[in-house]
Amino acid sequence: MPFGLKNAGATYQRMIDAVFKEQKGKNLEAYVDDILVKSRTLEGHLNDLRKTFSTLRRFNLKLNPAKCTFGAASGKFLGYLVSVRGIEANPDKISAILSMPSPRTTKEVQKLTGRINSLGRFISKVGDRCLPFFRYLRSKKRGQWTSDCETAFSELKKYLTSAPILVAPTIGAVLSLYLGVSDTTVSAVLVDDIKGIQHPIFYISHILLNVESRYLTLEKLALDLLEEAVRRSPPA
């Protein structure tokens, strides 16, 4: 289909969803033209690949051999490192922050917050941890990298050296959602209890706007729950 049209991406995604509707969410994930076939065993993987190739032939879709990898135990998919352990942050994205010197200009702080946003789902209470950076950008007196900013930057780097691995939710499992509120942010983490140990699936955080910061605690919890529901809802 011709790209460049406003809704081309969404239309293409709907087509891909329809093509792989019998596999998606089970042994296959697909986003636009990126496809990941996932299996627990080598024998199962071969069967899953046969089903995928059969579907591709049925709808006359072709793969680019130069961009295909088969039988990999782990690999990068949509900017994340995916393996049997779960979903990990892209090491390149973490290194990009760890190697950064302390920002001194507005442009450098904007670059830092952009890199943080790409890792937000892996950072517990990212709004609280990075609040000084966002306050810097909102301030009318930009250009003053404060001691609070420097402390937050150092703590962020320390956290990223051992960022958690996110797991896929177990089919049929009862998940737990923990909500947290403060004067400045709301945050949440969705976890799966595996053999008595809780593993994170997804972190979210939202810095409260001026009006939102005056909400009652219960209203902040409701906002937190809404944020989680919106972010975790499948696309229409």
Image: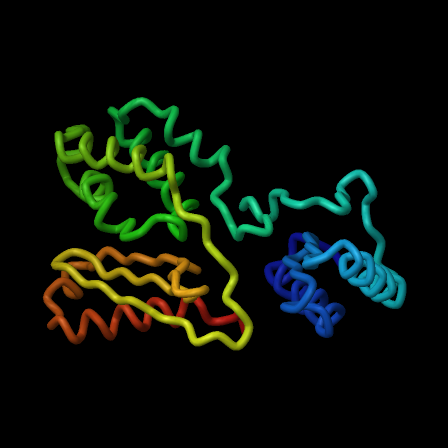
Could you say where residue 68 lies in the image, as x and y percent from the top left?
A: 77, 44
Could you say where residue 112 lies in the image, as x and y percent from the top left?
A: 34, 35
Residue displayed at 19% across by 69% down: 220
User: 22 or 16: nearer the eye?
Assistant: 22
Could you say where residue 152 lies in the image, as x and y percent from the top left?
A: 21, 37
Residue displayed at 54% across by 46% down: 80
| Side of 57 relative to 234 (left or right) | right
User: 92 or 184: nearer the eye?
Assistant: 92
Quarter of the image containing the N terminus? bottom right
Residue found at the far front of this picture: 195
| Side of 167 relative to 228 (left or right) | right
Q: Quadrant of residue 226?
A: bottom left
Q: Quadrant of residue 219?
A: bottom left
| Side of 158 relative to 143 (left or right) | right
Residue displayed at 61% across by 47% down: 77
Residue displayed at 16% across by 41% down: 139
Could you say where residue 104 lies in the image, as x and y percent from the top left?
A: 24, 24
How many circles with numbers are drawn on the protein?
0
Q: Quadrant of residue 72?
A: top right
Quarter of the image containing the C terminus? bottom right
As drawn, 188 above or below 161? below
User: 147 or 105: nearer the eye?
Assistant: 147
As drawn, 28 above or below 64? below
